[in-house]
Amino acid sequence: MLKNSNLTVGRAALIAGLAVLVMALTVPIVEFYIFPKLVDYRNAAKTTQNITNNTVLFSLAIFIHFLTVICDIVSGWALYIFLKPANKNLALVSAWFRIVNAAFTIAALANLVQVLSLLKTGEYFTSVQPNELNDLILFRIHSFNLQWRFMLVFFGIYMNLLGFLVLQAKYVPTIMGIFLILTGAGYIIDNLKYFFYPEIDTGFLWFTYFGELVFMFWLLIKGRKVRLT
């Protein structure tokens, strides 16, 4: 029984690492390639035209983000199993934070789905003026962006919880917990700017995001070998 439990912990680390790896590889495709290619936040008409001419690419962006929702849930579950021996209650709380985080992502993605719906509305309802349609589409994209930022603030809180949990796990290097706490702080400060201090440049916080990637590599290389005694 103990042997199976140990294997479960190691496999949970591997599953969590793979889930985070998928997100690390897919989300940048949307944020740094697809959206910049299609969305011009200062030109509603151009944005509508770009999405209309590249509907498949825009739909791909939606489903890539939906894939991250699945990975969120999988990684939250796997990290709960991996860190439960350190502090069961805190591990459970952090897992629920990850699930709520996934729910926030789905709510944000609903705006992008409505963009596709608005494009169909433009085809079938002649009473909708082109300028109104363009403004509605850009409004939905702005709404997605703001809700996405709110989700990332919540995700930063989750990363802090995870960091404190890792600090209690004797089978994980302490530095990993510190990295995660710094990453969480970076997410919170960098994304709260969209609500409270948009004029302040927080680009200098880019280095904090590497903490999550460092932890991912540790899970894939070392974490999967963890055996509890």
Image (cartoon, helix red, strand yellow):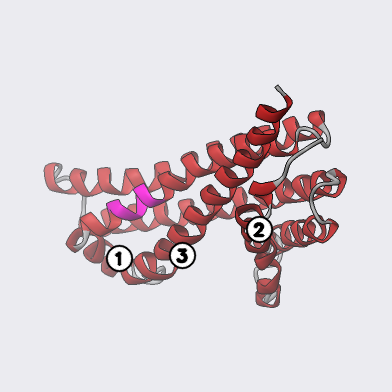
Dot 1 amino acid type = Thr
Residue ID at (68%, 55%): 222
Residue ID at (27%, 66%): 45
Whether residue 169 sits left or right of residue 18 in the image: it is right
- Element carrying mark 3: helix
**What is the distance, in whole Å, between disc 3 and disc 2 at their CAs?**
23 Å
Give the x, y percent position of residue 208.
71, 68
Q: How crowded is the residue under tag 2: few (<14 C-alpha within 10 Å), some, or many (20+)?
A: few
Is disc 3 in contact with disc 2, using a CB cutoff of under 8 Å? no
The residue under label 2 is: 195
Q: Tell me which numbered mark, 3 or 1, is placed earlier along the sequence.
A: 3
Dot 2 amino acid type = Phe
**What is the distance, in whole Å, between disc 1 and disc 2 at their CAs?**
24 Å
Give the x, y percent position of residue 23.
50, 54
The residue under label 3 is: 28
Q: Residue 181 occupies which quadrant of the picture?
A: bottom right
**What is the distance, in whole Å, between disc 3 and disc 1 at their CAs?**
20 Å
